[in-house]
Amino acid sequence: MSETMSAEDQIAQISTLLHRKLGVRGKTLSKTLRKAKHRLPRRIHKQAMSLAKVETLAHHPKLRLTLDLTGLGSATREVTAYLNEIDLADRRKGWWLSMLGGLAFNVLVAAALLILFLWWRNLI
């Protein structure tokens, strides 16, 4: 990521990565980050919010000149690096394993309660 990239391009890139990696969408980066807040670490969320704060300034030709492109570039690099580290296949596998683990626990508890009930009623 180079600092010569415009702030609008950096914001668009972050929005695209958030949609592709976390599945959240919004008209602006602020709305997208509001939906993705609990899926991002606090440090990454703060960096992304610094980009969202300058989103309106980036569209204005004269106010765009007042932006700190090096700071925005470092925030973009940090957020992009985190989002690129997300492995979608691993997240999917983790979700399925978590669901199956919960299901197995519920089956074991139901079986234990059935055996307890049968013992209590002197049926076994």
Image (cartoon, helix red, strand yellow):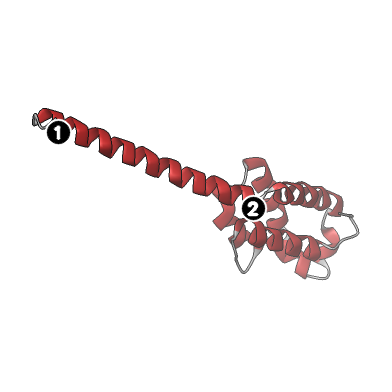
* For marks 2 and 1 on the same chain, the one whose residue lies earlier in the sequence: 2
Q: Residue at x 68, y 48 (%)?
A: 86
Q: Nearer the viewer, residue 64 or 70?
A: 70
Q: Amino acid at mark 2?
A: Leu
Number of on-image labels: 2
Quarter of the image that includes the C terminus: top left
Where residue 10 sits in the image (x, y, percent)? 79, 60
Whether 99 is drawn above or below 13: the answer is: above
The quarter in which the N terminus is drawn is: bottom right
Q: Residue at x 39, y 41 (%)?
A: 104
**Relative horizontal placement of residue 8, taking residue 105 as reference (left or right):** right
Q: Amino acid at mark 1?
A: Leu
Where does residue 118 sit, x and y in percent of width and height? 14, 33
Secondary element type, mark 2: helix
In the picture of the structure, the residue carrying the numbered disc 1 is 118
Q: Residues within 10 Å of mark 1 (few under 14, many from 20)?
A: few
Residue at image mark 2:
88
Q: How far across and how far down the image is residue 30, in percent? A: 62, 59
Residue 46 falls left or right of residue 93: right
Q: Quadrant of residue 51?
A: bottom right
Q: CA distance from mark 2 to mark 1?
A: 45 Å
Q: Which mark is residue 89?
A: none
**In the foreground, 83 or 113:** 113
Check disc 1 and report its element: helix, strand or loop. Answer: helix
Residue 9 horizontal/vertical position (percent): 80, 65
User: In the image as oriented, which residue stretches furthest toward the left?
Assistant: 121
Q: Nearer the viewer, residue 86 or 101?
A: 101
The image quadrant that residue 12 belongs to is bottom right
Q: Which numbered disc, 2 or 1, marks the residue closer to the eye?
A: 1
Front-lying residue, 47 or 57: 47
Q: Residues within 10 Å of mark 2 (few under 14, many from 20)?
A: few
